Each structure stands twice: as C-alpha cells, then as structure tokens.
Amino acid sequence: MEREQIEKRYTWDTSDIFPDDEAWEKEYDAVAALADLSAFRGRLGDKAALLDFFRADEAFSRRVEKLWLYASMRRDEDVRVPRYMTYEGKMQALYTRYASSVSFFEPEMLSLPEELLRERAADPDFAAHDYALSRLLAQKPHVLSEKEEKIMALAGEPLGGFREVFSVLDNADLPLPVRTLDGKRTRITHATYGLVMRGGSRQARKTCFKAYYGAYRSLLNVITAAYAGNVKKDIFQKTARGYESCLVMALAGEDVPPVVYENLIASVHAALPVLHRYVALREKLLGAGRQHMYDIYVPLVEEADISLPYDEAYEEVVKGLAPLGEEYVKLLRRAHDERWIDVCENEGKRSGAYSTGAYDTHPYVLMNYQPTASDLFTIAHEMGHSIHTYRSNAAQPYAKASYTIFLAEIASTVNEVLLLKHLYANTQDKKLKKFLLNYYMDMFRTTLFRQTQFAEFEEIAHRKAEEGEPLTRENLSEAYYALNKAYYGDGIVHDKEIAWEWARIPHFYRSFYVYKYATGIVSAVSIARAVLSKGRPAVERYFRFLESGNKTCPVDILKEAGVDLTTRAPFDAAMQEFSDTLREFEALQGLE
Ligand SMILES: [Zn+2]
C-alpha cells in the first residue's frame, strides 16, 4: 500500500511537532543561528556564566530535538522521499557545528578546582545539574594534565580503528560461500544464517552453520588481532587514567558498581542446571536425537494464531497492562486516540518498530503491525518505552529527563511480562499457553543467559590481557568453548565451530555493553512480579522509577522501584521465574 491509502487514524500526527515543512524550515533557520556556544569558552568558572551556558545549551538542544524528531519521522514514513533525506543531512551538519562549539565544556569543567565543583553541585541554582556535576567530580581523579588530555583526545580516533576493522571485515570481506540449502543454491549472509537457523531443515542448518563459521575461521588470525587490539585499547585507557581494571572503568562510565556484574554472573552460574533442564526438554520435544548447536534456534512451538486486527490487539494490551493502574491505562488510550502511533506498513516505510520523542512533544511509536502474537508484544514493548519517556519528561527538568541505556529496556520488558501473564491467565487454549511460555523462556535464554555468557567472556579476555597473557586465537576460542560447555551442559553436542562464536559478535567492540540486556530483564521480571503480587504499593514504586529519568545513579533509581541489584535477590528471583516457567511448560507437555 502507498502511504496515502492508509486511514489517517492509523498514522502518527506529526503536526504536534510542526504543522508543515515550511514551519520546520523556518525553525531550522532560526535555530541554526544559535548553534555556536563557543563564546562561553574560558568562562565556566564564573557562576553566572555557567548558569547562562546551561540555559543557552538547553534552549538550543530542546529546539534541535524537535527538528530532528520531525525530520527523522518524516523520513521513516517513506525513505524514498529526497526532501527528508536533505533535512537529515542539514540536521547532521547543524549538530556537528554545535558539538564542536561545545567540545570545550567537559575538559574546562574538569579543570576547575574540586572545591568549586563541589560548591556548584550543592548550589540550589544548579539543582537540575547536581547529578551531572557529581559525575564530573567522580571523574576528576582520572583526568590527566591538559597536555596529556590533548594526546588522549588525539588518540581517540585511531584507537577506535579496531572496531572499524571488524566492521569492515564482517560486512564486506567475510568470504561467505554459496551452498545448497533445502534444494536451493543460496548465498549465505548474516540474514540467511538467522533464517536458516530458525526455519531450515536440519541438514540445511548443519550445512549453513558449518559454512558460516568456516568463513569466520578463515579470517580468525585477523579477527584475533582486531579483538586483541581492542582489548589493548581498553587497557591503555584504564592504565592512563588510573582505573583498577577495564571492567571498573567501563562501569564507572555508567555509574554502576562492579558488584552488579558479579551478582549477575554468580546467579546465572547458580542457575545453569535449570538451563541444562531446558536443553534436555528441547531434545525431547524436537525428537531428532542428540541436539547440536545449530538446533538451538529452532522454535519449540509454532507462532500462536492470534490474528487480532490492530484495534482489538491494542485493547488486549490495555487489558494486560491494567495492573499498572488507571493513570497508566489513561496514557495508553491517549497514545491510541491521539495518534502517537504509526501503525501500518506502507511502501517505502522503515521496517521494524521503535519509540521516539522529544522533551517538548509526546512520544511517538513506529510499527509495521501484522496480526500476530509477536506484534501484540511489540505494541506492549514500544508503549513501555513511550510511557517511560513521557513520565520522565513530565517529572524531570530537561537535564535529567533522558534515562540511560542501563535503564532503557526495563519498562518495555515489564510490559511484555505483564501482557504475557494476562494472556496466559485468560486462555484455555493449550497451544497458545505453550507459545506464551516458550516466548518467555526464549527471552530468558537469549537476553539473560546468552548475554551473560558474552559478558563473562569479555571479563575473561580482559583479565587475561590485564595479567599480561597475550590473547591468541587458541586461548580465546578455548575460553569461549569452555563457557559454552558450562552454559549449555552435556545435553547438547558442542560442535567445534562454536568455539569461534566469539569471533562473530560485533558487540565485543563496545566493551562491557551487553550485560545491560541481562540486568534489564532481571529488573523487569522483579518489578512485574511485585506489581502482580503486591498491587498498588508496587505500582507506586514503579511510577517513581518511570518518573526518574537520569536524576541519579541508575542502581539507586532501581532501588526506589524496589529492585536492589547490589544484592543477589532480584537475580535469584529471575532465575526462579525461569525455573517456574520451565516447570509449567513441562507440566503442560505432560513430561513430568
Ligand atoms: Zn526496546
């Protein structure tokens, strides 16, 4: 369908941002004149000047956000329209100009005397910036002399080269072969690999798996050099800045205490026997004898046939999220009725789904709705992001409104869990029940166990390098293979190729990033359980989380919602939830 053919009520209303392109262009010209804040350079030690800088920066940023939002939303409606590509190019140029004009800010602030920073952080006039100022204070002991900082800044680009090397290799030079898969000559790509692992015949999966990993193996020397270089880059930075370890440095960047990482790994290890039980269940259900690593993505259950038209699906989501209270439901209805959501697929529209917004607008959601069970969850997920954004924007000043990545996937996952439990409780259909439990178990396997396995690998690789052991293709692959054996247990054949899986993970070039997926699901499961078992007091605590933006340390924000990641409790509760889900599934299956 072309976009014009879609009923208006199923499209988002961009006129809440700008009435039309002309208004956008006029605003662009006005804002472009404000993009240079370099006049504040050298004056930040002065209280009045610093306040003025914050004001000017906020005024500019808020207007820019709206410009970006409109340009990117209009582009995503139909990516073929050249006008919005031009808008995007203009925004990029404007942003680059602004960013280089304010690049003095952080180094200059960090060069101010500690007492002065402390004074500012405690000054009520800087209340909106107290957390940011306290973060600068925490960073200060790791800041070097002006001359050294200049060298660090100069080194930034070449040190980013390892990620670039991997990216080019992975997207351009990887020698992915052509193979016959289920009777068809197929060029193996990253996308076909995923499709075949889920939907191909066993022979096709095996062929594809061996060919795919074979391609990585053929470049294993250069991948090892890129990865080892990336780890050495981390070591260079942590050593230069005086951090205890690469892990401590990475977590300090997000104000997360290392004990959270330790708790995650320890709890997952304690729960590995449950994952092994899950692997055993798969073998029974798939009924093809011993499982291999190329069988692990095969769905245990077919997609449930809930073919609900969009409005009914939305209504079902509202019912599922009703435990979050009237206020939450009211916002869901507003999003539906006031056209925050772009629902249908159309010719040229960007694929997938996301939630977006600006501080001075309500959030928006892009979807490509299909009447499937998965898309019911997509609605719940994206509305989770949107309402988190909406409440944080409403409750916090601009400087504290946008929540960090550490917190970003919690509200969306809470909604998925609540919807799942609602659907489960309200159906007698055994097939649907199994689909739902399997969906939940997959969430645990892919988001909790798999990401923790990655997190643990990163920790091992960095520790080896920090202790002076050279990273080689052999010791990296051995470490990964041993982890894989520990995670999946003896109920599966650990094909030799899986030892090279570390070599294909792009996230490893953003060190210590993936653990956040795992802590996100742990927190969400904890919150959803509390909401369902404790009702209103838990909902109130959860709203405090939704309204916190990034006002303080993310772990403290979660404590307000009743989740203390510095203890084992929420982690162990999440593992218990996985175990309970598996038991329920086994009971339904009549395996017990
Ligand atoms: Zn999300």
Image (cartoon, grey):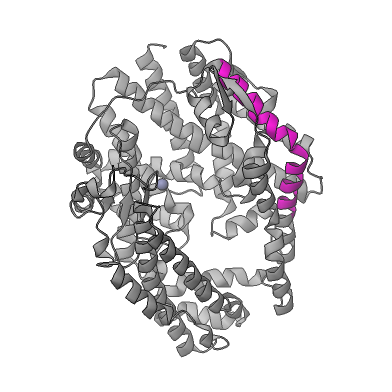
Does residue 580 appear to the left or right of 325 in the view shown? right
- In the picture, which quadrant includes the N terminus? top left
Q: Name which residue lies at 59% across and 30% down.
A: 188
Quarter of the image with the C terminus in it: top left
User: Which residues lie in the magenta part?
Assistant: 203-232
Quadrant hosting residue 381: top left
The rendered magenta stretch, by its main secondary structure, is classed as helix
Q: Where 90 sits versus 301, above or below?
A: below
Residue at 47% in and 23% down: 199
In the figure, is residue 90 to the left or right of 531?
right
- The structure residue drawn at horizontal position 31% and vertical position 31%, both measured from the top left corner, is 373
Give coordinates of residue 581: x percent, y percent: 40, 26
Magenta-colored stretch includes residue 434? no
Of residues 542 and 515, the one nearer the viewer is 515
x, y (%) of residue 311? Answer: 19, 40
Residue 116 at what x, y percent from top left? 55, 83
The tally of labels here is 0
Up the image or down, 183 lies above or below 169; here it is: above
Left or right: 200 as drawn, with respect to 480: left
Q: Is residue 59 visible?
A: no
Q: Is residue 223 magenta?
A: yes
Q: Is residue 242 visible?
A: yes
Q: Is 509 placed above or below 207 here?
A: below
Depth check, front residue: 561 or 467 = 467
Pick the front one: 65 or 546 = 65
